[in-house]
Amino acid sequence: MGILASDHGDEIAAAIRSSRLTIYDPLDGRPELFYDIADLETRLRQHLIGERLAYPLRTRSKVVKAQVCAALGYPAPSTFLRVRPRFPGQDLDVYVQKANNLQVWNEEVSPTRRYAIVQLDQGDTITAVRVVTGEVLALLDSTGTLTSKYQAKRRPGFTGSTLVSNSDTDNFVRLLRPVDALDDAVMRTLSPVERPQPGKVLTARAVHERLKRMVGVHIVDPGLDQERYRGQALHELACEVLGLGRYADHGQFPDILCQALEIKLQTSPTIDLGLVSPDSEAPAQEISAGMRHCDVRYSVAYADRIGPKDIVVTAVVLSTGKDFFSHFQRFEGLVRNAKLQIHLPGDFFS
């Protein structure tokens, strides 16, 4: 079993206090001091929920940032610098919300940055905290202000199930030491939403061999406008064929975190890739310290619709992000990232 997020968060906070680092100091050489989203969210919930912020807006902002410092183990500066993100070392911004209309003004929304959204009730008491990436915020934007243009399709001539990458990237191998086989008992102990553990990650080739078991499997299709539920059905199936003990979804990238695996279900040629290009060398520290987006494995499952409520998986393609565009053709385009007003759904903090 993995370390409980609360225990791990306590360890990171203690280590940060001992390091005497500030919120502005980079952690490039100290990856053990970087909170993942689960630890970060748990830590902030434990230390912020129940606190009262009955102050003018500017004072409230300073007070909540000081509370975040204390929760994470940092000393609060006497003056917070006007930098973005506000907590550079943790790549973290903090927003306090009384209403469900989140406003991110006059700055770019980074797909990989973490955003802590703090909910206040009408009595100015903190009732909830959620931490998400900029990519998750983009999915909530119904205005089209922030639009993802990273899309691709399979290059002409490629058909059937294909292993694009014969091996993982050198960086992936160095960090996670993937293996060709793991005992079923070991696989059952792994959770899809826990960070990958070195030596307990399958190689790209082994992942592909297991995922090919999905070919021929039927998935219930709830309808043309229910892409989310079709994707969830594929996610559950992928967890099953990989041999994981259970299905779980944290709503973050990548879908199956313990295997650094993003999965896509395609009933049409165009693949939506989100706000980060698969071949990006930008850090993906949420997965593992030192990881990059191009190290992640991408599985694209193609399916045919054979009835009003039935689709069948016909092929599975697997590639590292680094090799992705050797098999798929990129659609070029721009991403606009400013002046967002995002309606937070009623279950956002659930």
Image (cartoon, grey):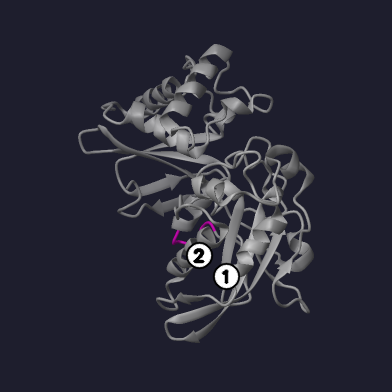
Say which residue appears at 76% left-offset and 67% top-offset. 327
Measured along the vertical axis of the image, is residue 234 above or below residue 134? Answer: below
Percent from the top left, x then y, of residue 145? 51, 58
Question: Which sits in the foreground, 92 or 38?
Answer: 38
Measured along the vertical axis of the image, is residue 217 above or below residue 275? Answer: below
Question: From the viewer's perspective, is 309 left or right of 114?
Answer: left
- The quarter of the displayed image where residue 26 is located: top right
Numbered badge on residue 237: 2
Q: Dot 1 corresponds to which residue?
A: 214
Percent from the top left, x then y, of residue 240? 51, 61
The residue lying furthest to the bottom in this view is 307
Say which residue appears at 26% left-offset and 29% top-offset. 50
- The quarter of the displayed image where residue 214 is located: bottom right
- The quarter of the displayed image where residue 110 is located: top right
* Disc 2 element: helix
Measured along the vertical axis of the image, is residue 343 above or below residue 68? Answer: below
Q: Amino acid at mark 2?
A: Leu
Residues at badges 1 and 2 in contact (C-beta under 8 Å)?
yes
Could you tell which of marks 1 and 2 lies nearer the N-terminus?
1
* Disc 1 element: helix
Percent from the top left, x then y, of residue 58? 38, 28
Tag 2: Cα neighbours inside 10 Å, few (<14), some, or many (≥20)? Answer: some
Stretch of the chain drawn in magenta: 141-146
Q: Amino acid at mark 1?
A: Met
Say which residue appears at 50% left-offset and 65% top-offset. 237
Examine the structure image and report whether residue 143 is included in the region drawn in magenta: yes
